[in-house]
Image (tube, coloured by chain):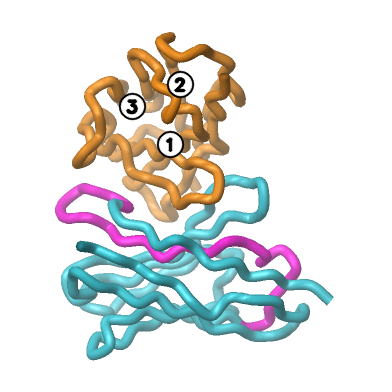
Amino acid sequence: EVQLVESGGGLVQPGGSLRLSCAASGFTLNSYWMHWVRQAPGKGLVWVSRITADGTNVTYADSVKGRFTFSRDTAKNTLYLQMNSLRVEDTAVYYCVRDGVGSIPFDAWGQGILVTVSS
Amino acid sequence: ETVLTQSPGTLSLSPGERATLSCRTSQTIGSDYLAWYQQKPGQAPRLLIYDASTRATGIPDRFSGSGSGTDFTLSISRLEPEDFAVYYCQQYANSPRTFGQGTKVEI
């Protein structure tokens, strides 16, 4: 069974840092593109970042470029999102998401983890 | 960036009725790389439709997708109580991938 489990969320002050983790099971990260998607309270879905299956290429939304870093540990089958210089507008539920095989997009989602940036 | 506009914002229907949701894109979506997701309160989104008209694994056939180019539609033939939720369209042909703002289907 495919599972994605996020952790590491919580309350942080503006300007602070947080690292999210996403533990994957039931498949290997080496075979899939992976993404982070966020959703501010009561708002819609916004794509944040993507890493390719071979881990060589990472892209970011303009709103987080230079502040967030998406990485992975294939030995642990775990993804990470290092978030620095956090802003109030980064407050959201963050989802770890898998691209499916072929043209299938976002076929597996984690349960989401809440990040609150507030003083 | 490709902008997706969903309409209506809210659709008020009863169980057994047909729902028709629209998604218009600011640019032509190549290869019909348009998906639909369902999200219930407190849950992660779930993939319903990809490639504009292909149902994802396990999705009931009362859900159907159609359209191409810049105009896409999600139809739910007969609403079941569990179908009342928010629906998002997404394009994955262009980077960055973008979502519509959502349509809420309510009783």
Q: Give the residues drawn in magenta, as a range.
A: A84-106
Q: Which residue is mark 2?
A: B21
Note whether B37 is above or below A65 in the view shown.
above
In magenta segment, residue A103: yes
- Quadrant in the picture for the N terminus of chain A: bottom left
Q: Which residue is mark 1?
A: B89
Give the alpha-carbon distance from disc 1 to disc 3, as whole Å: 14 Å
Position of A22 with respect to A2 (left or right) is: right
- Residue shown at 34%/71% (left/top)? A51
Note whether A98 is above or below A23 in the view shown.
above
> Which amino acid, by three-letter code, is at mark 1?
Cys
Q: Which of the two marks, 1 or 3, is nearer to us in this view? A: 1
Q: Which mark is residue B74?
A: none
In magenta segment, residue A113: no
Residue positioned most to the front: B81
Q: Which residue is mark 3?
A: B69
> Which amino acid, by three-letter code, is at mark 3?
Gly
